[in-house]
Image (cartoon, helix red, strand yellow):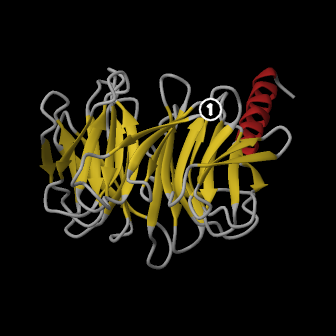
Amino acid sequence: MTTLIRVAFVLLLVCAGRAAAATDWAEFALPEGSGPHDVAPAPDGTVWFTAQRAGALGRLDPSSGHVDEFPLGKGSAPHGVIVGPDGAPWVTDGGLNAILRVDPASHAIRRYPLPAGRTETNLNTATFDKSGVLWFTGQAGVYGRVHPSSGEVRVWDAPRGPGAYGITTTPDGMVYFASLAGSYIARIDPATGAATVIEPPTPRQGARRIWSDSEGGLWISEFLAGQLARYEPSKNSWRSWRLPGDKPEPYAVYVDKHSLVWLSDFRAGTLLRFDPAKGQFTQIAGQKSDVWVRQLLGRPGEIWGADSAHDRLIRVTGQD
């Protein structure tokens, strides 16, 4: 075997090993009746999740499989959870109509209720901008912000009424949200709070979740159109790719540091990975059964999702 062939053979083995590692699949059972909706892996290795049906915030220790659930209060129905710059989980709670901060050590809850007159907003998801301000959406037709230092909460009416759902922050600090019922995305002016509508080229596409890549491009799950779309703000340009299969319903979307796009097809009950360079979708190998994942989030080497239909969390590992 020549030196060149040996080198090629070694590279082939390395690449094959990386491909296999990229699709390692694990499932973590949660207490029956949890109804997990969103998930947020934390820097300390634990994973927070919203137990929507149980009205609680949950925490999984993946090393042991141990799960704790912390009740959030009577009437709670938590939707989204993210880990803030302070290391604490922040929850958008539609049942309590409030943003919650849960202390990761004491589990004490600080509640940021929406202003009087803003009831039943169906709070959905949240993101922090570069100045540490939390922005959130409410599918009943609102978006707003919380200043953690002062506790001030402000709310604005979303363009065209109901629908505000997914939300994200770009590397340059701009905040965008997607409207499921309104079928648009919008850019928020952080100084004034005003939202500017950006029209996707596909009508009635049902923009649901939205995530920024490292270049500031915005990836959108177009739930009603069965498409994954990318909007490039600097060029005001759009591209879209239809998911494989019959009548796909892309729901969750997340972009990792390698610019690979992870998403779920809710109708097919599958997780997919999209390679923008190749324009190809791949179903995640190792998936043991159907999964209905509403949200995805990651940390180095891991992708996490909450399977709302089966009371479990999903982890895909192997990304370096």
Relative depth, front residue between 26 and 158: 158
Question: Residue 285 appears at what percent x and percent y?
Answer: 71, 57
Residue at (33%, 32%) from the top-left corner? Answer: 170
Residue 66 location, quadrant? top right
> Is any atom of residue 212 visible in this view?
no
**Which image quarter holds the N terminus?**
top right
**Which image quarter holds the C terminus?**
top right
Residue 135 location, quadrant? top left
Callout 1: SS: loop
From the viewer's perspective, tell me whether residue 126 is left or right of residue 38. left
Question: Residue 316 appears at what percent x and percent y?
Answer: 69, 47
Question: Residue 272 appears at what percent x and percent y?
Answer: 56, 57
Relative height, residue 7 to residue 12 (above, below): above
> Is any atom of residue 284 visible in this view?
yes
Residue at (44%, 59%) from the top-left corner? Answer: 95
Residue with the most extreme bottom position: 246
Residue at (75%, 24%) from the top-left corner? Answer: 4
Relative depth, front residue between 185 and 21: 185
Relative height, residue 4 to residue 294 (above, below): above
Other residues around mark 1 within 10 Å, as few (<14) / some (14–19) / many (≥20): some
From the viewer's perspective, tell me whether residue 62 is left or right of residue 212. right
Question: Residue 6 appears at what percent x and percent y?
Answer: 82, 27
Residue at (36%, 23%) from the top-left corner? Answer: 132
Q: Give the residue type that dot 1 points to.
A: Ala
Q: How many marks?
A: 1
Identify the residue position indicated by label 1 in the image: 42
Relative depth, front residue between 37 and 108: 108
